Amino acid sequence: MVGRSNVGKSSLINAVLHRKGIARVSQTPGKTQAIQFYLINEKFYLVDLPGYGYAKVPKSVLRTWGDLIRGYLEEAEDLRLIFLLLDVRREPAEQDLTMHEWARALTDVDERIVLTKSDKLSNNQLATQRREIARTLEVDDAQLIAASAVTKKGIDEIRREIVARL
Ligand SMILES: Nc1nc2c(ncn2[C@@H]2O[C@H](COP(=O)(O)OP(=O)(O)O)[C@@H](O)[C@H]2O)c(=O)[nH]1
Ligand SMILES: [Mg+2]
């Protein structure tokens, strides 16, 4: 799972795992610069990559972020699926596009785009944003999952995507 700070990654992980406090929600944004591995049912790892895009992060930390992520992606032989999280209300930022390119370049690794906080939009707005974001990322609409940690929309779909690869 990867996405910019505050996109709702920790909330989504907790919803997918049906746990309240596995991933910590709303700490100081941009502070976590470590990769968290959650071993689930002794079967697979859900990997929480550090968030990016927080304005106050200095350039040196940004570079470290890129190295950390790229290093992980290059070494992670068991990696099967990347969920790139995007706030459904926002245009994808430059780092989102970079992350998308890295994910897309990996062979034997699928990518799904999760549109977070979808409870904040009406159905009409959601449909518009889906189209826009799919177009920007040059992906098929079917690769997008609209989700919400509040209403639990999309959570089962995310679980199915994971289970399908076990
Ligand atoms: N309305 C709404 N708010 C959310 C949702 N997911 C997260 N948030 C809020 O967004 C903020 C950042 O969430 P967090 O999970 O800590 O994001 P992270 O920095 O990506 O791990 C918090 O205030 C959450 O309560 C969601 O699906 N809907
Ligand atoms: Mg978090």
Image (spheres, rainbow, N blue to C red):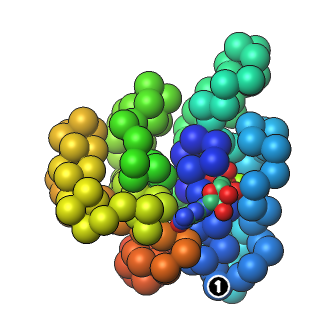
- Hey, which quadrant is residue 18 in on the image? bottom right
Left or right, 153 with respect to 2, comes to: left
Residue 44, position in %: x, y? Answer: 62, 74
- Element type where label 1 sits in the image: loop
Amino acid found under the numbered disc labelled 1? His
In this rendering, is residue 56 above or below 134?
above
Up-down relation of residue 39 to residue 92 (above or below): below
Give 36 or 129, whichever is nearer the viewer.
Answer: 129
Find disc 1 in the rendering and name its residue: 18
Q: Position of residue 135 (x, y in %)?
A: 18, 41
**Residue at the (56%, 50%) spot, across then down:** 7
Relative image position of residue 56 (x, y in whole percent):
74, 23
Q: How many numbered marks does the figure carry?
A: 1
- Residue found farthest to the top: 59
Mark 1, ligand 1, within 8 Å: the answer is no
Q: Is 73 on the left-hand or right-hand side of 64?
A: left
- Up the image or down, 115 lies above or below 164; here it is above
* Screen quadrant of the N terminus: bottom right
Residue 26 appearing in the image: yes
Q: Tell me what residue is drawn at x 30 percent, y 65 percent.
A: 122
The residue depicted at 63 percent of the width and 48 percent of the height is 6
Determine which quarter of the picture holds residue 81. bottom left
State which image quarter holds ligand 1: bottom right
Against 67, residue 141 (above or below) is below
> Can you give x and y, in whole percent of width and height, for residue 67 in the image?
66, 26
Question: Residue placed at 75% from the left, 42% from the top?
Answer: 29
Q: Is residue 80 visible?
A: no
How dense is the environment of label 1, judged by Cα within 10 Å: few (below 14), some, or many (20 and up)? few
